[in-house]
Image (cartoon, rainbow, N blue to C red):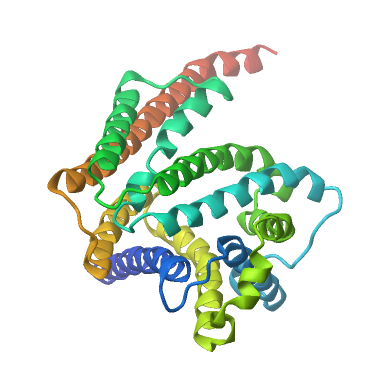
Amino acid sequence: MDEEKGTTRSMKILMSVALYWVISISIVFVNKTLLSSPTNNIDAPSFITWYQCVVTVASVWFMGTMGIANVPKFELKRDVLPKIVPLSCVFTGMILLNNLCLKYVELSFYQIARSLTILFNVAFDWIVLGNRTSLKAFGCVLLVFFGFLLGNKEEVRWSVQGVAYGVSASFFVAMNAIYVKKKYPLVDNDPWKITLYNNFISSFLFFPIMFGFGEPKIVMQSPNIYRSEFWVLMTFGGALGVLISFATAAQIKYTSPLTHNISATAKAAAQTVLGLMWYKNPITPLGGLSVGIVLGGSLLYTLIRRSEMQAKDKEAKAVVEEKQPAIEEKKIAS
């Protein structure tokens, strides 16, 4: 009986990790195809990102209406909407810049171009939240930064636009993490509600961006909009954006947040290798080493931060346990 339970649990872990890897890697490849493929692309990154936001809103509405996976019913509160707008502005910048980075860099370099998120996380932690980073963790950040510099030096098809968008995307990813923490209580700490609000508001924020870059004209003149394969790929990309929420939640549920981060790092390595194989991107030995340095530094940072958080939790628990007898004595005396 115990062996059967162990086998079942192992299968759940394996399936959840595999699901996360497949969906996460598929999103990147689908978006790369939409943004750069000579046959299925369209030179309108804002339009592509906007369409995927609309698909996400429609999917959340459908799942909420049908009661799928405990997704709450579609509801937007007037008093909450304006308070979420700052977060949605950051979210809009994050997803657009991610796609712009993917458009201009090789898939094998994508991880390097967006690797400075960890640096911005540490900076915002200190500036905004007042949290200082330990020397060990900061050493990992420096390691990632070194990998970023080496990767840029060694990239064969280097793009200044791609790197600029990648660094900007990293900034917005770090900002998004802080804003989500602040705004979560407004939506009852429900990730589906924050997804709904963000994508709903972003679908309107993208209009001035699309018109500002003249994308409606580009879209109407593109022959791809008359091809069913293009719209299937567009819709599939939006659906994958919703499914990744399920996959992430499942992986954390059946493993742990730490294992999820380790899995995400390993997935990034696999994604880079697949990009090299599929697109046959040229890469130097030092370029390959830079990817390893970035991923290794990120993994070490995750492990060190996790260890530090566990140590703090133990200290807090010890303090509570020390105070408990004194509290009990006061209760008895009163």
Left or right, 270 with reference to 185? left
Q: Position of residue 274 (x, y in %)?
A: 26, 65
Would residue 54 be seen by someone viewing this image from the given angle? Answer: no
Q: Position of residue 48 (x, y in %)?
A: 57, 67
Q: Is residue 43 above or below residue 175?
A: below
Task: Kindly tell me whether residue 132 is visible in this rendering.
Answer: yes
| Residue 237 x %, y % | 51, 71
Q: Residue at x 48, y 46 (%)?
A: 165
Residue 305 appears left or right of 200: left
Total numbered labels placed on residues in the image: 0
From the viewer's perspective, is residue 40 above or below residue 201? below
Which quarter of the figure is the N terminus placed in? bottom left
Instruction: Give the quarter of the figure containing the C terminus.
Output: top right
Tell me if residue 318 comes above or below residue 172 in the rendering: above
242, 89: nearer the viewer: 89
Residue under the point 57% across and 77% down? 222
Q: Residue at x 31, y 51 (%)?
A: 109
296 left or right, relative to 84: left
Identify the image quadrant of residue 289: top left
Residue 156: percent from left, percent from top = 24, 50
Between 157 and 240, the one nearer to me in the picture: 157
Q: Quadrant of residue 113?
A: top left
Q: Residue furthest right?
A: 78
